[in-house]
Image (spheres, helix red, strand yellow):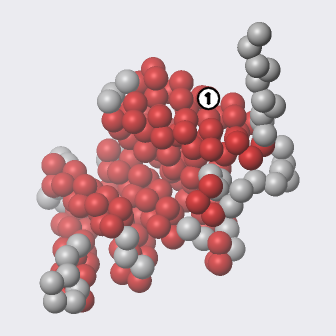
Amino acid sequence: MPAEPLPQLYGDLPAQIRLEGIKARAYGQLNRAGDALAALDAADRLRERLAEGDELPGGMMAFPVEKQLFYASSTHLWLAGAQHLADAEARADEAVEMFQAAPPERQRLGEMSLARMDLAMARLGRGDLDGAAAQIHTVLATNARRRTESVDRRIGHFTRQLALHPAAGAPVAIGLRESIIAHQERTIAELPPGGHL
């Protein structure tokens, strides 16, 4: 006789939500839209099972709503297309607002910067250069104080996409590229001998 399944513990749910978010982004990179969207839906359904005020694990095991939204925005960016860009922008915008609303001592600056990068990429894709620039300038200011490799990679990716954009010659785009170059040059100057990005 098969063993009875163990009761679902609330502490397991954040890990399951995280897993669905990871799956969604992986399927997005593979351009498997159906599987990616199914994983996002599964994450949303699992989130609904968390009751308000439940004791949840913290630290590395924490997977707050804003991080789930950020994973969703990244998934939609990988899937591309007008509707996915709109969905990416909406999810990233909501994630940034939630990250900002956290008390200063609990703000996740690296993750908030990555959500801002998603927001900038979505706005760039939708032709909103000013909106993209506003996010990038904020990320550059944060990254200058607290540098992370994942944010550096995303800035590099944004720079490549900006160079390919139809409005790459617009004053806003040129100014944005110059700000990114200045940020990168300042970082290289601050590295110790033998250091690298």
Indicate the quadrant containing the C terminus: top left, top right, bottom left or bottom right: bottom left
SS type, badge 1: helix
Front residue of this view, candidates 55 and 43? 55
Indicate the quadrant containing the N terminus: top left, top right, bottom left or bottom right: top right
Residue drawn at (69%, 31%) of the image: 45
In the picture of the structure, the residue carrying the numbered disc 1 is 42
Front residue of this view, candidates 81 and 186? 186
Front residue of this view, candidates 6 and 31? 6
* Rendering coords of residue 154 (x, y %): 31, 58
Residue drawn at (35%, 62%) of the image: 150
Using the rendered image of the protein, determine whether residue 142 is visible from the camera's viewpoint: yes
Residue drawn at (65%, 78%) of the image: 105
* Rendering coords of residue 176 (x, y %): 25, 68
Left or right for 37, reference 155: right
> How many numbered discs?
1
* Rendering coords of residue 140 (x, y %): 35, 74
Left or right for 23, reference 100: left
How many other residues sit within 10 Å of disc 1, few (<14), some (14-19) or many (≥20)? some
Identify whether 97 is placed above or below 7: below
Using the rendered image of the protein, determine whether residue 88 is visible from the camera's viewpoint: no
Quarter-of-image position of residue 84: top left
Three-letter amino acid code at the position of disc 1: Ala
Identify whether 154 is placed above or below 69: below
Front residue of this view, candidates 134 and 117? 117
* Rendering coords of residue 110 (x, y %): 47, 67
- Please, which residue is most extreme toward the front here? 1
